[in-house]
Image (cartoon, helix red, strand yellow):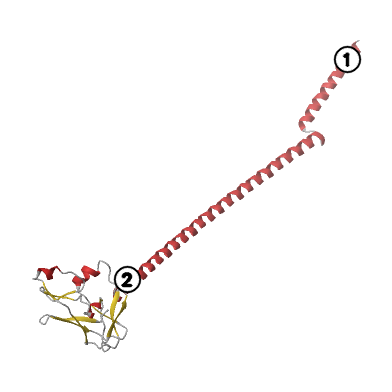
Amino acid sequence: MPAIPSNKPYRVGRSRTGLGLFATKPIKKGTKIIRYFGPLLDSRNKKHDAIENKYLFELNGRWTIDGSVRKNVARYINHACKPNAESDVNVRKRKVVIRAIKKIEPGDEINYDYGTDYFKAYLKPIGCKCAACEKKRKKKRAEAWAERLRLKAKAEKKALKEAEKQAKKEKKAQAKLQARLKASRSVNEKEKLNGSSNGLARANGKSLNGHGGKSPAHKMMAAEAGILAKASVKQVSEGHASA
């Protein structure tokens, strides 16, 4: 890690993406913080054009700064989608200076937007880890979690409603069954009562006819028997008289 003079308003420290550049003093908006420098690469030079690393800062179609040299402290500045600094490019002088676009407090990480090409080539495949993107992902995770809880609650409510509906059906069916059983018991009790009454009536009729008096039929039979008996006696008497 390169030595940084104490009069400089920044230091190299640990960041969520590895190493980063942090403010050690208040930095006003518009302040030129640090220069991004390194060897100039000419795209017309085949050897230069073949160089590839993450610290190449393209000035235009021809010139590029190779910021991979150790003394280039500005290379520790990380990308941010909502930065507090920006790259001030002077193509004619082939110089790049990082300038504050808002007030930066001590302890804040200094960052700037690397641009669309760099973002697509290096950051998008692995996911941007800047504070803004992390906040966005955290919000999405919270929304996804809230949605899962909402769906779970909805499913539980639906299940409870179905259970209550099923319980009502079962209760209704049970009530119908109880009513049928009650009606059946009532019919059986009536049949038993009717059967007992008929049996008692038959028993009473037999007792009266057999012991308590004679029925009209019995009386007629007895009368006919008496008439026949009288006729027989009369015939016997006439026979004795003739003799």
Q: Amino acid at mark 2?
A: Arg
Regarding residue 89, the answer to whether it shows in the image is no
Q: Which residue is mark 1?
A: 238
Q: Residue shown at 10%/68% (left/top)?
A: 46
Secondary structure under badge 1? helix
Nearest the viewer among 144 and 6 is: 6
What residue is at 56 percent from the left and 53 percent from the top?
174
Q: Mark 2 — residue?
A: 137
Q: Quadrant of the N terminus?
A: bottom left
Image marks 2 and 1: residues in contact by CB distance under 8 Å = no
Q: Position of residue 16 (x, y in %)?
A: 32, 74
Residue in the picture at 79% in, 37% down: 207
**Front residue of this view, candidates 186 and 24:** 24
Front residue of 31 and 222: 31
- Of residue 198 and residue 36, the one placed in the foreground of this image is 36
Camera-nearest label, 2 or 1: 2
Residue 106 coordinates in the image, percent (x, y):
31, 86
